[in-house]
Image: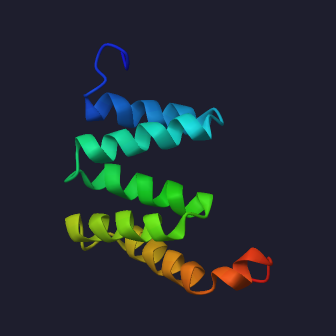
Amino acid sequence: AAELKPDDSKVQLALAEVYERSDGLERAGSALRRVAVLAPSNFFAQANLGLFLLNRGEYQEAISRLTVASSLDPKSSRVWSALGHAQLLEDHADVVAHGAL
């Protein structure tokens, strides 16, 4: 389905979830990035990419995506929590690099 509908954000989002669950993290990241481009106003696309990037330690890009997600759904406590966490980790990246945070 993904090959037949490479520009369908719903298909790409589902594909990203499958990749994440099967430890295909590089492929999941690629699919999530594609969804974010295809559907820039899709809360789930932005939030999932932000959370994925946060878990990968890509704090600046995670902050960017989570900020977009928070503007799309200002009541999402999960996104606000993740955004605060990403900002904390970004602010203390030198400490995080040494495993102290």
Q: Position of residue 50 (x, y in %)?
A: 43, 60
State whether residue 34 is above or below residue 71: above
Q: Quadrant of the N terminus?
A: top left
Q: At 60% from the left edge and 41% from the top edge, which residue is drawn?
A: 25
Q: At 63% from the left edge and 86% from the top edge, which residue is drawn?
A: 92
Give the image quarter of residue 96: bottom right
State whether residue 96 is above or below residue 64: below
State whether residue 53 is above or below residue 78: above
Q: Position of residue 52 (x, y in %)?
A: 51, 54
Q: Position of residue 14 (x, y in %)?
A: 40, 32
Q: Is residue 25 left or right of residue 73?
A: right
Q: At 32% from the left edge and 41% from the top edge, which residue is drawn?
A: 35
Q: Is residue 79 left or right of residue 60?
A: left
Q: At 47% from the left edge and 81% from the top edge, which residue is drawn?
A: 84
Q: Position of residue 7 (x, y in %)?
A: 25, 28
Q: Quadrant of the C terminus?
A: bottom right
